[in-house]
Amino acid sequence: MKKAAIWLALILVLPGCSGSWGWYVVNPYTSTGLTNLRFLADGLYYTILLSFSAIAISVVVGLLIALPGLSANRKLRGINRTYVEVVRAVPILVLILWVYYGLPQMANISISVFWAGVVALALSDSAFEAEIFRAGIQSINRGQYEAARSVSLSYPDTMRFVILPQAIRRILPALGNQLVYMLKMSSLVSVIGMQELTRRANELVVTEYRPLEVYTVLVLEYLALILVVSAAVRWVERRMRTDERF
Amino acid sequence: MVASETRPIIQIDQVSKYFGDFQALKDVSLEVALGERVVICGPSGSGKSTLIRCINQLEKHESGTIVVDDVELDDSKQSLNSIRAKVGMVFQQFNLFPHLTVIENLTLGPIRARKMSKTEAGEIAMRYLERVKIPEQASKYPRQLSGGQQQRVAIARSLCMEPSIMLFDEPTSALDPEMINEVLETMAELATSGMTMICVTHEMGFARRVADKMVFMDHGEIVEMARPDRFFEAPESERCREFLEKILQH
C-alpha cells in the first residue's frame, strides 16, 4: 500500500519536471488554481448525494425483487427472473438517457436531472442487488426457517429477525462492491448535465484546455472518495462480526 | 381421570408421504394420548423423522389425516398456526439463531408471535433457562456454548412458547458422547412434568426409563408398537429384533 502510494506520487511528479504538465491550472497557491480546484471539488456533493440516494433505493427495490425469486411459486419466480434479466440487459448509460429524455414524454411528467440520474442508477443497480440478496438468503440453512416456524414466527418476522440479519452479514462485501460501483457509475450522469465530479472536470477542460491535469485531479478525487468508502464498509463488516464473536 | 389420560391428543390415520417417487411414509397410523411419552426408533431412512415433521407440518402429508388436539391439519393458515402454537420441536442440529444471544433466542417467539412484553418474555425465558440449568449463559451467543448446552437452550426455546406437545428429532445424534447425558436428563425431567412427548432417538436406556410406548419403524411403516418392557424383552417382528440387537450390542 505504501509502495503503491510512492509509485503513484513519482508517476505524477516526474513528468511534471519535464515541463509537459501544466499544474498551474490546479495550483492551490494561485487564486485561479484555487478557484478551479474548488470548482472541481464542489462536484463531490452531487456525486455522493446521487450515489447514496440511488443505492438506498436500489437496496430496497432489490430486496423486494429478490423475495418472489425465493418463492416455491413459479409465477412469482418468473416475475423475479423477468425483472432481473430485462433490467440487467440495459447499459446504464442507455438507461440514463432513456429515463431523462424518454420517460417524461411517455409518462407525461417532468423530471429533474438529479432525479433522472437517481432513478436510472437505482433501477439499473436493483437487478444486481436482487441477485445478491437472493444468493445471501438462499445460503441460510433451512433449519433456521424450521426453527423460526416452530416458535410460531410469521414469514415477515422470520425474514426480518432471523434470515435477513444473517444474510446481510454474508453479503456485506458484495453490497460494498455495489456501493463502490455506484460511485463510479454516477460519473455517467454527467452526460445529461448533472453537476457532479466528472461534469465539472469536463467543463473546466473546455475553458482551461488542460485535460491531462484536470482529469488527473478527477482520478484522484474518485480514488480518495472510494478509498474512504471502502474503509467505512470494512469497518461496518468488522463491527458486525464482533457482535457475533466468532 | 382415566378418560382424560387416554384422550388422544394426536391421531395419525393412514398417512402417506412421498418425496418424488420415493414413498417415505406408507399408511402410517398412530395415536398419542395426552401426557404420553412415545419413543420412535428405526434404521435411518425408515421415515421416523418425516413422521414427526408431518405432525407440525414441516412436511406436508399427501394422504390420510392428522388431527392434533381436535384440529385437523390441512393447508389452511388457521390449522398451521394452531399447530405451531401447540407443538414445540427440538432439532438434531439445534438450529439456534446464531446472531442472537441465548436470551434473545428464547424471547423472540414470545415477543413477536405471542405479543408478550420484553420484560415478561425475559422472566419466562430465565425461568426455563434455570430449568435446563444454564441461567448463567443467558447473554452469551450460541457459538460460545458446548453442543449439550446449545441443545438445552433449544429445548428451553421451545418451552418458552408453552407448547402442550414436544417433538424431539434425534436430539442427541449431533452431540459428543459426554454431552448426551445432560440433554437426556433435561428431557427426562420434562417427561416427569407430564408433557406429551414424541422422541425420535436411539438412546435405548432413555427410552426404557421414560417411554410409555415404543414404536419401531422400517421402510416407512410402523413395524412394531408396544410397551417398553414387552418391546425390549420380546419383540415380535424379526426386523425389530435384528435392529435392537445391533444397537444394544455396544
Image: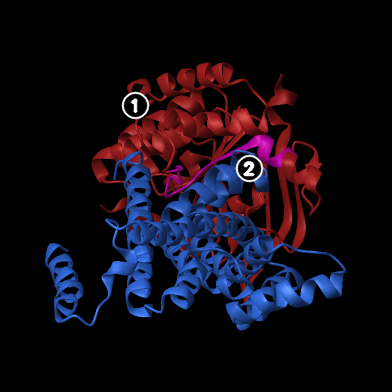
Chain colours: A blue, B red
Q: Nearer the viewer, residue A75 or A172?
A: A172
Q: In the rendered structure, find residue B179 and report the number of the disc placed on it.
A: none
Disc 1 target residue: B137
Q: Nearer the viewer, residue B4 or A228?
A: A228
Q: Nearer the viewer, residue A59 or B197?
A: A59
Q: Nearer the viewer, mark 2 or mark 1?
A: 2
User: Is residue A78 among the parts visible in the rendering?
Assistant: no
Q: Spatial distance from mark 2 to mark 1, Cα to Cα?
A: 25 Å
Asked if residue A40 is among those painted magenta in the image, a careful observer would answer: no
Specify the quadrant that holds the N terminus of chain B: top right
Disc 2 target residue: A157
Location of residue A214 with respect to A31 vertically, above or below:
below
- Amino acid type of disc 2? Asp
**Horizontal relation, residue A228 to residue B199: left or right:** left
**Percent position (x, y) of residue B60?**
69, 58
Please state the extent of the stretch shown in magenta in the rendering: B82-97
**Percent position (x, y) of residue A222?**
38, 65
Badge 1, how many Cα within 10 Å: few under 14, some, many 20+? some
When asked about the image quadrant of residue A152, the answer is top right
Badge 2, how many Cα within 10 Å: few under 14, some, many 20+? some
When asked about the image quadrant of residue B206, the answer is top left
